[in-house]
Image (tube, rainbow, N blue to C red):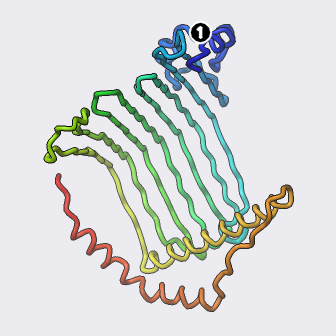
């Protein structure tokens, strides 16, 4: 792209690239960047827009490339039948919007800005050994990355969530229920490094990187039972076994279409060994939390 910017300009300037009725010219990207994906002029159906701008005169001279994209997805429905493990599973997502800007230069300049918004996402599973519901509402994320030569880099991210409700079922009974609402997470790093690597620098020079975080929420409630910990371990084992079998079946089916030979998986443990392992997990589930408490109590943090 840096060597042939006219190809993009001549081919894409007169074409309508944005999802609407007004065509945007690549010669004025400022108006494109100022437009938000939540603008009312964007249609309510799914849309995708991509702009590429590259400026360079001759080979060997400084160049800069700018990529601007926007995505608007109204609704996505996915329905799956996951046998007797999770039964009928439905995933519904609505109000997914994203926009971003990527700028890269020949002198190692890099600026990345991206925002993602989600109206609602719900995962529901019924009729299987493992079931439950996960409902996420009003999720937003904003990220910014700035890296320039002879300057300390900067990375920032902010995540805002309206509410999240979850319920996990095992063998027809609820083992975990929780709610997390009005959460706000901010992360920002601070670099203190030597940008000029001189030979006469002393050994005592230190490079430090700090990560500043701020987490706030309104409601955080979790309800568990006595069998929650061993049941969660059993759920993880069953899901791992299910996805491993599905992946192996897919490889075996795809191997019939090409010259790639099919390699059978490693022999699985017998049912007797599995039952003994599950019994050991059931007997030792009371000893999980003391180990976690020991690690947490021994940790140190500067606040």
Q: Which image quadrant for residue 74?
A: top right
Q: Is residue 229 left or right of residue 150?
A: right
- Residue 72 location (% of width, % of height): 60, 30
Secondary structure beneath dot 1 equals loop
Residue in front for this viewpoint, 63 or 277 = 63
Residue 120, position as x, y percentages in the image: 54, 43
Q: Is residue 268 above or below residue 103?
A: below
In depth, the one of 17 and 181 nearer the eye is 17
Is 220 displayed left or right of 199 in the figure?
A: right
Q: Is residue 66 above or below residue 241?
A: above
Residue 164 in sight here: yes
Q: Residue at x 66, y 42 (%)?
A: 76
Task: Kindly identify the residue that appears in the image at 16 percent across and 44 percent down.
Answer: 205
Q: Is residue 217 above or below residue 147?
A: below
Residue 171 in the image: state x and y as whole percent. 60, 76
Residue located beneath label 1 in the image? 25
For the image, the number of numbered tags is 1
Horizontal relation, residue 206 to residue 295: left or right? left
Q: Using the rendered view, name the quadrant where residue 180 is placed.
A: bottom left
Mark 1 Cα within 10 Å, few/some/many (few <14, many 20+)?
Answer: some
Q: Residue at coordinates 48% horizontally, 79% vertically from top-left?
A: 230
């Amino acid at each position: 792209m840096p060597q042939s910017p006219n190809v993009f300009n001549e081919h894409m300037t007169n074409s309508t690239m944005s999802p609407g009725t007004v065509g945007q010219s690549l010669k004025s990207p400022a108006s494109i960047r100022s437009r938000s994906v939540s603008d009312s002029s964007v249609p309510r159906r799914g849309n995708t827009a991509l702009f590429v701008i590259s400026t360079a005169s001759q080979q060997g001279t400084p160049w800069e490339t700018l990529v601007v994209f926007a995505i608007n997805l109204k609704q996505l429905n996915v329905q799956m039948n996951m046998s007797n493990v999770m039964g009928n599973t439905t995933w519904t997502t609505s109000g997914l919007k994203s926009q971003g800007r990527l700028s890269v230069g020949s002198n190692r300049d890099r600026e990345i800005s991206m925002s993602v918004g989600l109206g609602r996402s719900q995962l529901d599973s019924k009729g299987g050994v493992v079931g439950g519901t996960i409902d996420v509402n009003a999720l937003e994320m904003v990220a910014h990355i700035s890296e320039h030569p002879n300057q300390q880099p900067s990375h920032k991210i902010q995540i805002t969530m309206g509410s999240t409700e979850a319920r996990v079922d095992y063998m027809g009974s609820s083992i975990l229920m929780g709610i997390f609402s009005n959460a706000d997470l901010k992360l920002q790093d601070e670099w203190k490094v030597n940008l000029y690597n001189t030979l006469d620098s002393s050994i005592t020079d230190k490079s430090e990187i700090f990560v500043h975080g701020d987490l706030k929420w309104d409601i955080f409630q979790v309800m568990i039972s006595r069998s929650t910990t061993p049941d969660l371990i059993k759920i993880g084992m069953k899901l791992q076994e299910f996805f491993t079998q599905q992946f192996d079946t897919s490889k075996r089916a795809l191997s019939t279409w090409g010259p790639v030979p099919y390699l059978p998986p490693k022999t699985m443990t017998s049912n007797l060994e599995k039952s003994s392992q599950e019994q050991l997990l059931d007997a030792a589930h009371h000893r999980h939390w003391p180990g976690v408490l020991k690690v947490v109590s021994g940790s140190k943090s500067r606040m």
